[in-house]
Image (cartoon, grey):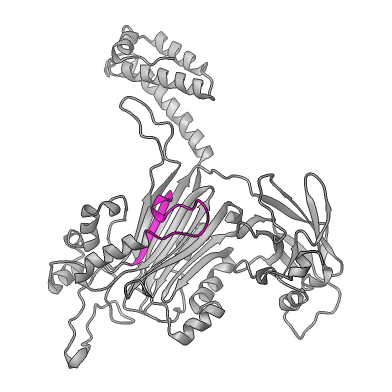
Amino acid sequence: MASLSGEDASQHCEGLSLSDVESLRSRSASIGSTGSSGRLQLRHRVAQLMACVEDISSDDEIHEEVSRTLDEAFLIWGKKLKDKWQEFRLHLVTWNVGTASPPPDVTSLLQLNSLGTTTDMYVIGLQEVNSKITTFLSDLAFDDPWSIFFMTVLSPLGYMKLSSVRMQGLLLLIFVKHVHLPFIRDIHTHYTRTGLYGYWGNKGGVGIRMTLFGHTICFMNCHLPAHIENTEQRLDDFEKILEMQFEGEGIPSPLDHEVLFWFGDLNFRIADYGIHFVRESINNKRFNLLWEKDQLNMAKKKEAFLKEFKEGPLLFKPTYKFDLYSDVYDTREQKSLFWFNEKKRKPAWTDRILWKVRNTSEASKEGEFPEEENPISISLTNYLSHMSYGISDHKPVTGTFKLEMKPLVTDPLVTLNAEGEWSAEHDVLIRYSAGQEFPNSAWDWIGLFQMNFRHVKDYITYAWVEDDEIASNRDSKQVYMSGSEIPKMGGEFLLCYYSNNLQSIVGISEPFQIQPSQMPIEKDLPEERSSWLQRPDNPESGGNSERRKGI
C-alpha cells in the first residue's frame, strides 16, 4: 500500500469527527499484527493520524478522544515491550590495589547490603595485583589470592566465576548467577601489552567477550601510562588496545560489539589548575569546577573514537592519590633520585568506568519509522567511589548498570535432570536432551556440583556424555554415574552440562537432593576429594585419549 503525501493525509483529516475516530480505531484493529504487510498498513494508519494531529487544536471536541486513543495504544505497546524485554543487572568494580592483599570485607564495595542478590553479574577489574616473579608463577599454577577471595565471598550467594584473564598486574574477573549460565556463550579472553613499546605487560589491557542472551558484550580492563604530560600516550595505547583480536572465527573487534565497557586505572589527570585550587574545589565539593579540565573529558570532545563512550557524572571526590589507610590526599614527603623531594601528587579521577552501545537499529528517513529500536540499552543506576578502603593510594570505583535487552536466545542448548533417587549406595542416572543445532562433542561432560560451586572446575565428579551413555532415543539420552563417586554425606546439588566446542556450561539442572548414605564415610580425605580421586581421568586434563577412542 502506498503511503500518503502530507497533502493527501491532510485531506483525510478534513471534517474529522468522533465517529471518524471510532472508524479509524476499528479499521486499525482489523489490521493483522504479524507480517510485513500488516506492519506496512499500520505505519500507513499512523502516518494518517500524525497528519490529522497537526490539524487538531486543544479546543476541538475530538482532542480528548484522540489523546485517549493514543494513550491506549502506548499502554498496549508498553506491555508488549515489557513482555519481550529482559532486565539484567550488572555491578562493575575497578580498583588499583597497589600490590596489596585483599581487605577483610568487601560488603560495601559489592553493595551486598543494598543490592543483595538482585545483581545478575559482577565484573571486577583490578590493577597492580602483586606480580613479583615468585608470586606470579604461583598464581599461574593456582588461583591468585584476589580470585580466591572474591570466589569465597560470592559463591555462597549463588555466583560462579564465569571467566578470568590475567596479564601481570592486570586481573579481570566475571561472576554470574547460575541461572544465566546456559545463555552466556562464546566466551573468549585476550590481552594487549603496551609497556616498554609493547613488550612488557605492566601497562595495557585485558579483555573478556561473550554473547549474553545472544547479544555481543565486551569488557576491557586497562592500566594506561601515568603522569599528567602523557595524555597522548594514553590515547595511543587505548587505540592499540581497541585493536585487540579475540581468537575464533567471526568474533568482532571490541568496538564492533553491541556493548563495550571500558574501565580501569586510566590515569587521566586534571590539567592547568594548580594543586591548591584543585584541593580547595574538592574540599568545597565543587567538583564541577574541575570537570572541564579533566583530560578524559577533554579528549572525548576531540577524539572521534571516544565520542560514543558514555560516563556517569563525577559526583565523587577524585580517587587518587591518598595516603594509605586514609581519606587524606598525598601528604608524605617522598625522596626521589639524588634525594630531591618529589612533588605531592595533584588529586585526579584516574579510576573510571565508561561504556558504549552500538546503534544497531536502522536509520530512519524523515517522516518514516525505524524498522525496530535498538535491541539492547543500558542505564546507569549509580556511579560511586568507596572511601572506606585504604589498602592502596587509589579508592575503588563502582558502577551499577541495568541492561534492558530483547533476548535473542531464550532456550538452553541442553536440558538435563537427575532421574530417580540419588545416593552413594547405587549407580545413578542423568537424562538430557539437546537441540538439533547443538554442536555436541565426544569430549562433552556432565558435572555434579555443590550449590555453592566456585567455577567450572569445582565439580565433585562427572560423566562423559559418550562413554558413560547407557540409553538413547530420538528425544533424549541417558548417562550414569557410579554410586562410588557420589558424596556419601548427601545434600543439595546441581548438574551442569559442559560443551567442549563452546567452552562453556550450556545446560544446568534444577537443584536436587542426594540422600545420605548408610555406609561408613572415609575419614582420611574430605568427601568431595575422595570421590574425585576415584576417576581414572578428568575433563580438564583432556581425559585418557585411548579411552576416548573406545579402547
Residue at 19%, 85% in the rendered image:
342
Image quarter (top left, top right, bottom left or bottom right) of the N terminus: top left
**Above/below status of 465 relative to 425:** above
Q: Position of residue 88 (x, y in %)?
A: 49, 51
**Above/below status of 335 relative to 261:** below
Instruction: Pick the residue in front: 379 or 300.
Output: 300
Instruction: Pick the residue in front: 170 or 197.
Output: 197
Q: Is residue 349 left or right of residue 279?
A: right
Q: Is residue 286 left or right of residue 458?
A: left
Residue at 74%, 55% in the rendered image:
417
Residue 116 seen in the figure: no
Image quarter (top left, top right, bottom left or bottom right) of the C terminus: bottom right
Q: Where is residue 79 in the image (x, y as percent from the top left)?
A: 50, 34
Residue 412 seen in the figure: yes
Q: What residue span does the magenta drawing correspond to?
A: 243-265
Q: Position of residue 95 (x, y in %)?
A: 38, 71
- Quarter holding residue 59: top left
Q: Where is residue 105 in the image (x, y as percent from the top left)?
A: 46, 75
In the rendered image, residue 15 lying in the magenta stretch gets the answer no
Q: In this view, does 333 lie to the left or right of 521?
A: left
**Above/below status of 229 relative to 374:** below
Residue at 77%, 84% in the rendered image:
523
Farthest bottom residue in view: 339
Total marks placed? 0
- Quarter holding residue 168: bottom left
- Quarter holding residue 5: top left
